[in-house]
Amino acid sequence: MLIKSKSKSDVLSSEITPESVYKDRRRFLTGSLGAAFGLATGGFGSLANAADGDALRARAPSNMVRSAPADWWEEKFASISPAQRSGGFYTNEALTPYRDVTSYNNFYEFGTNKGDPEANSKEFKADPWSVTIEGEVGKPGVYTLEDILKPHAMEERIYRLRCVERWSMVIPWVGFSLADLIKRFEPTSKAKYVQFFTLFDPDSMSGQRSRFTTISWPYREGLRMDEAMNPLTLLATGLYGNYLPPQNGAPLRLIVPWKYGFKSIKSIVKIRFTETEPETSWNMLAANEYGFYANVNPEVHHPRWRQDMETPLPQTLFNSSRIDTRPFNGYGEQVASLYKGMDLSKYY
């Protein structure tokens, strides 16, 4: 991986992301955060947009995780640092507006239409939340969200997101390296893969109780161990300098920016370390369409969508531009070596 030294041309994240977003977040953190977490009623509040379409108003999700002290959460999010500009953790491409990031989603647990996750997740509760660690590890167990997050400093990374459906976004995520978490649980020599599971809760996730669902719940995904340990792989707890809304995978989701978006599993409740390649939901459903690796590859087309072009969102009547798709979503310098010698038209 090429590591570049910081230059005078490198800019701060606050200079790329609309300044009002960060100012509103700081006012929110220093003012209303403690009071918001003292409340324990209702679901996640919607984070409204200001007139510019990007800035967030100061209203926190009221039930994020009551078990974590309010001052602890405030410290975590008040100390977010921008990731180093080297290593692929940053792009200076135009950010997708917050409103589009949170209203145009694939999260089948809440429905199959793009607007369903936002519409159907208003009563979703992430309080309390725990993550089960199991399989080939030295420290298995059930860990609260505070246990999971507390040792890790939060940073902001601006990544491209490419959906297999041929649309794309650029999103400023908040989170920490998955590799740092994995090391804490001491995987054994048998741990060759990492499998992830989404919450299964049909009472609050309407898509899971639908008679028309074709997915075998819970939703599951997996990575090879070297993919999971790659510095780019992120466990996200927020976006746009604030907490993850439920439609984006609150309170904890995976981000693997060189793979198609369906690999970035949401609302994680279990992480399993295995010796053999684990099952993944879309591969189980249609193996000929959704391979285990799911690396962004403009030369391997999906049966329903060509992959050599993509449409950055938002798309409007007057702006439907398309751009060329890059191998590994533009992160080849950081990850291509993981697949040296592999036929990527076979291992797609």
Image (spheres, rainbow, N blue to C red):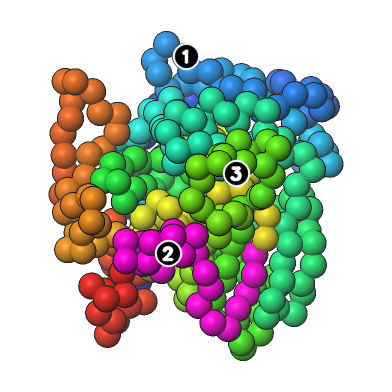
Q: Which residue is labeled 3 in the image?
A: 208
277 in the magenta segment: yes
Alpha carbons under labels 1 and 2: distance apart: 40 Å
Q: Nearer the viewer, mark 1 or mark 2?
A: 2
Q: Which residue is labeled 2 in the image?
A: 283
Q: Which of the two labelled residues, at mark 2 and mark 3, occupies the earlier sequence position?
A: 3
Residue 180 at what x, y percent from top left? 61, 66
**Front one among 122 and 211:** 211
- Span colored in magenta: 271-292
Q: Is residue 89 above or below residue 140?
A: above
Secondary structure category for the residue under label 2: helix
Give amino acid for label 2: Asn
* Residue 205 visible at all: yes
Q: Who's the residue at 68% across and 36% down the image? A: 204
Residue 62 at what x, y percent from top left? 73, 26
Is the residue marked by circle 3 packed among few (<14), some (14-19), or many (20+) residues within 10 Å? Answer: many
Q: Which residue is labeled 1 in the image?
A: 50
Give amino acid for label 3: Gln
